[in-house]
Image (spheres, helix red, strand yellow):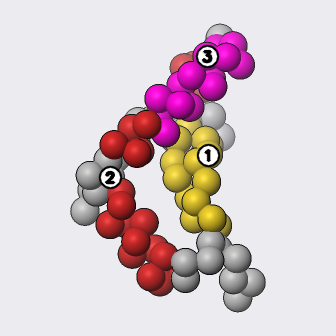
Amino acid sequence: MKIESTVFTNRDFMDLTQEEVHRLSAEQSKNLDDSLELPSAMQAVEEEYGPEGDWQDHWVTLDTKGTRVYTRMYLSNDAS
């Protein structure tokens, strides 16, 4: 299973307004929603960690240069 996110450099974000970042976030979230592979990956995560968690979309910075990806992550309510 291969799910790819678009990688954005810090330069991509430097001159964006808050409104543009929100628009870009909405576009990236739609890309995740449209992914054919993502539902089965999400199901596998929930099977491993339990269905009580919460899926959230976030920008994640990958390195000190500010390289980012938009991702959907699972926040488990299980404290263990």
Q: Which is nearer the N-term, disc 1 or disc 2?
A: 2
Disc 1 target residue: 58
Is the stretch drawn in magenta largely helix, strand or loop? helix
| Viewer-nearest residue: 11 or 47 | 47
> Residue 21 at x, y = what percent?
62, 23
> In whole angstroms, how far apart are the C-alphas of marks 1 and 2?
16 Å
* 42 sits to left or right of 13: left
Disc 3 target residue: 20
Q: Is residue 72 above or below residue 49?
A: above
- Amino acid at circle 1: His
**Can the viewer see residue 8?**
no
The residue depicted at 43 percent of the width and 37 percent of the height is: 30
- Neighbour tally class for label 2: few under 14, some 14-19, many 20 plus, Cα within 10 Å: few
- Does dot 3 land on a helix, a strand or a loop? helix
> Residue 34 at x, y = what percent?
33, 43
- Amino acid at circle 2: Ile
